């Protein structure tokens, strides 16, 4: 019976638990729980997953182990159910993505909503899988399931990549820059799905961490126009793409045969960072290298 504690987007701190027989419990302190109200159902559904976003709390499940159901609440206490999804296959899991999208997966099906009421069925394009779990990260949805597969959805509806796994998968999560899936046999799998949309050798996730544009081949983690770097009376100015709050190491050399040495540690700004080397006021050639530590 999954529990999903977080701050309600409508200003109320609430934790919600869902389960069999339409069970929905709410708590503001994780100690005292209140039974929520669920309407629009003549019989009680089995609720298997819940998530939360701009449209409120969204839950998914099944009626009689066959008919998919979606439930929605603005405050975690009063819930309404919807059965306008056209598939007659089970729904297992739901996740919130970017741009207000919620995506739910199940036996051979995927569905998307932005308001929790109107759902659009996706296309598996000939691939049948019981998608028991889904996670969002790196600007894409990755669904895991049986008989042992991972499906990658860019828009939440149409899969764009598939990986076949030797074991059936029952869960998947995203964190710290990677997807991790768990199999039916209790083993864990790190999913190294690293898209490189602009084909410049750096993954999209790494480019976002570096402050570069993963869709632009000319957006690189490098000093801007190093040949045109101005030599001012106050020193040499260098500029590079950066992320606010990230620490950058500036290495400097006056002789490449002797290598680089640590020169400064700078906290980055949003977009770009400008650094003035006040010690470079003579005619000596200077070489710079910018580094940062990615988690």
Image: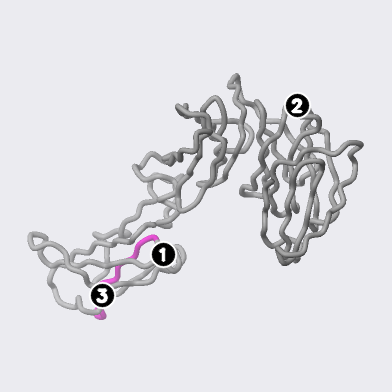
**How much space separates mark 2 and mark 3, taking CA atoms?**
64 Å
Q: Position of residue 247 (x, y in %)?
A: 36, 68
For disc 2, the neighbor class at 10 Å (few under 14, some 14 to 19, many from 20) is some
- Relative side of 295 to 223, left or right: right
Residue at (34% x, 42% y) in the render = 201
Task: Locate residue 13: give its quadrant.
Answer: bottom right
Q: Which residue is mark 2?
A: 87
**How much space separates mark 1 and mark 3, taking CA atoms?**
16 Å
**Label number found at residue 287:** none
What is the residue that sits farthest to the left in this orientation?
A: 257
Q: Which residue is mark 3?
A: 277
Residue at (66% x, 39% y) in the render = 93
* Residue extent of the magenta highlight: 233-241
- The secondary structure that most of the magenta stretch takes on is strand
Q: Secondary structure at mark 3?
A: strand
Q: Which residue is mark 1?
A: 272
């Amino acid at each position: 019976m999954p529990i999903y504690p977080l701050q309600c987007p409508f200003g109320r701190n609430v934790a919600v638990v869902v389960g069999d027989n339409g069970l929905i419990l709410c708590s503001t302190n994780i100690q005292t729980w209140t039974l929520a109200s669920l309407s629009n159902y003549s019989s009680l559904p089995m609720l298997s997953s819940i998530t939360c976003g701009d449209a409120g709390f969204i839950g998914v499940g099944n009626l009689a182990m066959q008919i998919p159901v979606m439930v929605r609440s603005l405050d975690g206490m009063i819930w309404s159910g919807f059965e306008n999804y056209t598939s007659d296959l089970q729904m297992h899991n739901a996740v919130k993505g970017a741009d207000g999208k919620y995506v739910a997966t199940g036996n051979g099906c995927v569905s998307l909503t932005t308001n929790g009421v109107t759902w659009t069925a996706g296309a598996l394009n000939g691939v049948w899988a019981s998608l028991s779990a889904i996670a969002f990260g790196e600007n894409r949805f990755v669904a895991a399931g049986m008989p042992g597969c991972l499906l990658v959805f860019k828009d939440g509806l149409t899969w764009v990549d598939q990986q076949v796994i030797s074991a059936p998968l029952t869960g998947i999560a995203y964190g710290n820059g990677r997807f991790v899936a768990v199999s039916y046999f209790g083993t864990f799998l790190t999913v190294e799905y690293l898209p490189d949309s602009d084909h410049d050798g750096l993954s999209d996730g790494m480019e976002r961490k570096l402050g570069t544009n993963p869709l632009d081949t000319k957006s690189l983690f490098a000093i801007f126009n190093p040949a045109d770097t101005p030599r001012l009376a106050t020193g040499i100015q260098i500029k590079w793409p950066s992320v606010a709050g990230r620490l950058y190491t500036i290495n400097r050399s006056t002789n490449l045969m002797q290598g680089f040495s640590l020169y400064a540690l700078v906290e980055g700004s949003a977009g770009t960072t400008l650094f003035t080397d006040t010690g470079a006021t003579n005619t000596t050639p200077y070489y710079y290298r910018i580094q940062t530590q990615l988690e």
